[in-house]
Amino acid sequence: MSHSDGVSDPETGAESRSADARTGDASNAVGASDAVDAAVDALARGEPVLVHDAADREGEVDLIYHAADVASEAVARMRTDAGGLICTALSHDVCEAFELPFLADALDHPAVTDEDLAYDERASFSLTVNHRDTYTGITDDDRSLTITALAEAAANPDDTDFPGTFRAPGHVHLLRGAPDGLADREGHTELGLALAAAAERPPAVVVCEMLDAETGGARTPADARDYAEEHGFVYVEGRDVLDALRR
């Protein structure tokens, strides 16, 4: 889920990562529909899921929670066990209701560009925010407050005073979902939001890349699946989510 850049140098890691991803995909060939159903059920129960997008996209596995279920312990798990960027993805309609821009459109600086992305047409990043009742905004408790409040806001956008509740800049990165979801874009943002919709939950999910502390790269699907099995979490392939949920 490297939402802006961070794509591996093709000469130093992309080929081997794709091979690992293909190995992981093959072992998940049986029971693909069951895995998607299990992921939907897990999010409905408030549990996290692990989602691999595609070997020919980012080739990364994200740990995904519904935003309403991100207690401080979940923030701690994401920063220690996953290690990537903790972001909250909101649906296109919710972002429109709150007038949340794409960050690249809001910044006026010559460094701002989406032209160098190797995996997609544009980044999903919007603003960074803190809840106004936080202190620095970076602690597990502070980020949990901000994220769960974002879930409440996504559930009731018409009744939310967004600028009165949140301030920018902050420590929670917001991501804008594509207007037509998976029909427009096949990233972790849209995969997570599609799973949340299937679980009949508000359009707000938290995504965090699973990184390998030894290599510094993305965890392979095989390693991520081992982590999921160790902790009793559901692992699902993005292509299976697409087959099951794309409209």
Image (tube, grey):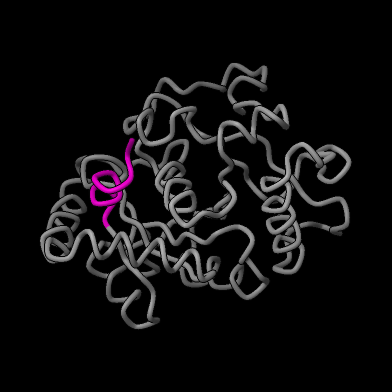
Task: Please determine whether, in this image, residue 27 is positioned above or below residue 243.
Answer: below
Magenta part of the chain: 237-247
The quadrant where residue 71 appears: bottom right
Q: Position of residue 195 (x, y in %)?
A: 42, 52
Q: Main secondary structure of the magenta part?
A: helix
Compare residues 69 and 144 and report the one nearer the observer.
69
Residue 24 picture quarter: bottom left
* Spot occupied by residue 215 in the image (x, y as percentages of width and height): 32, 64
Tally of numbered tags: 0
Tell whether position 241 is magenta.
yes
| Residue at the image point whose x is 84% and y is 37% from the top | 163
32 inside magenta stretch: no
Q: In the image, 88: left or right of 122?
A: right
**Is residue 216 rendered to the left or right of residue 30?**
right
80 up-or-down from 206: above or below: below
Which residue corresponds to the image point at 87% horizontal and 50% vertical from the top-left? 132
Task: Tell me what residue is drawn at x 63 percent, y 45 percent.
Answer: 173
- Report the front residue among 22 and 204: 204
Give the x, y percent position of residue 74: 59, 71
> Which part of the image, by quadrant, shows the C terminus?
top left
Residue 200: x %, y % from top left:
51, 54
Residue at 16 percent of width and 53 percent of height: 16
Vertical position of residue 186 compared to residue 25: above or below: above
